[in-house]
Image (cartoon, helix red, strand yellow):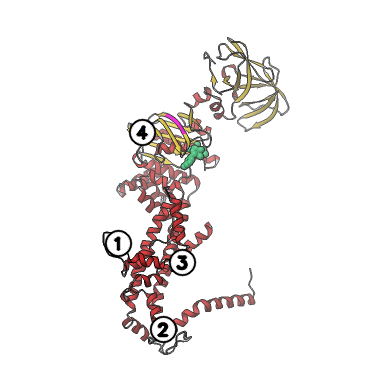
Amino acid sequence: MGSVSLKNVSKSFGAVKVIHDVSLEIEEGEFCVLIGPSGSGKSTLLRIIAGLEDVSAGNISIGDRQVTDLPPKHRDIAMVFQTYALYPQMTVRENMGFALKLAGMPKAEINAKVTDVARMLELDQLLERLPKELSGGQRQRVSMGRAIVRNPSVFLFDEPLSNLDAKLRVQVRGEIADLHRRLQTTSVYVTHDQVEAMTLGQKIVVLKDGRVEQVGRPLELYDDPVNTFVASFLGTPSINLIEADVTGASDACAARLPDGTEVKLGKNNGCMPGQKIFFGIRPEHARLSLEDQPGAIRARIHAVENTGSDMVILNEAEGFRITAAFKEQRALEPGASVSILPDPAKIRIFDAATGKRIRRGEDA
Amino acid sequence: MKTTFPQKLARGAVYALLLIVFCGPFWGILATAFSKTTVQPGQLLIWPDQPTFDHFIYAWTEVKAWIYLFNSLLVVAIGTVLQTTVSALAAYALARKKFRGAAFISLAILSTMMLPDEVISIPLYLILHQKLPLLGVSIYNSYAALILPLVGWAFSVFLLTEFMKAVPRDLEDAARVDGANEIQIFLKVIVPLVKPALGTTTIFGFLMIWDQYLLPLIAVDDRSLYTIPVVLRSLRVDEIMQQNIFIAVTVIATVPCIVVYLLLQKQFNRGLMSGAVKG
Ligand SMILES: Nc1ncnc2c1ncn2[C@@H]1O[C@H](COP(=O)(O)OP(=O)(O)OP(=O)(O)O)[C@@H](O)[C@H]1O
Ligand SMILES: [Mg+2]
């Protein structure tokens, strides 16, 4: 049984409260990603689940067991650290078998398990080496192997890829996904990389200042963010948020952008005329064309970033900037005049004062 | 780089000088201890004259150097083990555990390094005479009196504390998640990683205990509990004792130090080196 449940968990270090009343349900077998900016409390929350930090208030259960007051070793969890935390004086084999040895498992059985997992992770040639004789990627793999050998009900990962170079990171990311498909072990994975979060997570938890901003499936958060923080945290290049005024009648509002362009928000968009909002449109939902289009935003290309697979166009309109992105290759030069047409179905608007999403049919 | 002949010569001369300065006295002691020719206090032979074991035999049987050698070895063996154990445990607590008054305790330990032995000798004498609660006896005039005052040594506590602070916390957390208890974390994660430093503190501790002179003087009364340094002192002022015999006892006293150094040489050098690199 490997579900994880946090109920109203708070944590203070001395007088400083760093986790505020977090409640979270992670299903058995689910891959849950905790994401947030530096200092948002991701590691602290993970260490609380591990039992390495105690809570100031609240309850934690793993499976159907209350573990709030249990030490790490009785929680049936394994953890992969950002620094890998391999014991320098032990060989790969000893590192991987350490937990089993402490648990009093017979030597032959430990050896069999370690060999099994080592083969699975292609570490079988390295078993007699010391950590200092391994590359960064191999060390990372050993630290995962050390967790897998124990066959815990929950895996905890704290930014396990952040010390790898970009290419290896993508590779190991894929391996972690494969591993999860194969083992189906509940996993809690901390990262501040939104690509990792979007590709690995079945559930993403966005944290900010020790509070949960939103929980959901990756595309849910991407398409349906509850506030400007979540909207701009996920997605690269990040969402355009443009200050705007709401005009028109309440059943047919439009957003007036700083350059005077009015973009229709459709019927019953939940906003009130005169309200100040952030007009949000993701770069990939902003259609860019070289011809004049009625109702489009007039802008000038400021810079072109071409990664080969994506083109990102940074544009300057009167009084604001707006980014557009698309897959196809087009001949575009800085300085050119363009018109930009946001996809009406993809426009998201947020209250300018609170940053909260304004939804259809809701009162502002 | 090519070295010219004069450079080689100069270097050789410096080495020779160092050799004479450091090994000369030692050579003189050996030459004198093994020679029949007797010398006056303050004199050493440069060349052995009429080689003999007589002085050693006399030192062993008549002076009964073996008693004092045994005392010294016993004190140094138990003392070093206890001292290293206590230092390592204290260092772990100071390096890692948060507890009330940690800063004060740290300061208290540090302050013991600032007091010369002579200053604490009278209070120590009085304490050694105190009757222990429950048992109703004092440890004065026993092996315990020779050993216990040396068990806490600020130098090794602080050296080990610094090394233990450098052990990454993640390692401890990893061990904790792996199911290790506090003792196992200490023995299987911390201790192996500070081994070079432990080698250093063990050797320094050994020498510190071996060289104790003032403590045995105030801790015991019985001549049969004397350690080598105390006996050497009493032989030195002994008018009738031949100088060569005194020197033979000196040689006997030196042997264990050399043996221990040779055994722990690798650890010792590594400990000094890593200390140097860490700064
Ligand atoms: N042992 C501690 N004592 C005091 N404050 C702490 C301690 N550990 C963490 N904090 C504080 O708690 C907050 C959250 O820290 P945490 O390490 O969980 O952030 P994070 O989201 O993991 O950040 P990063 O992405 O940089 O790793 C920070 O403000 C940090 O300063
Ligand atoms: Mg962190």
* Residue tagged 3: B116
Circle 3 packing at 10 Å, graded few (<14), some (14-19), many (20+), is few
Q: Which residue is mark 4?
A: A62
Res A338 quadrant in image:
top right
Task: Determine if the C-beta at disc 1 is less than 8 A from ligand 1.
Answer: no
> Nearer the viewer's eye, disc 1 or disc 2?
1
| Distance in Å between CA atoms under marks 4 and 1 | 52 Å
A53 over A23 or under it: above or below: below
Magenta-drawn segment: A19-23
Q: Quadrant of the C terminus of chain B?
A: bottom right
> Compared with residue B197, is residue A356 higher up or lower down, i.e. above or below?
above
Q: Return the residue at label 1.
A: B132
User: The residue under label 1 is which amino acid type?
Assistant: Leu
Q: Is residue A28 left or right of residue A206?
A: left
Residue B53 or B164: which is nearer the viewer? Answer: B164
Whole-percent x, y for residue B243 in the image: 41, 85
| Alpha carbon distance from label 1 to label 3 | 26 Å
Q: Which residue is mark 2?
A: B33
Residues at marks 2 and 3 on the same chain: yes
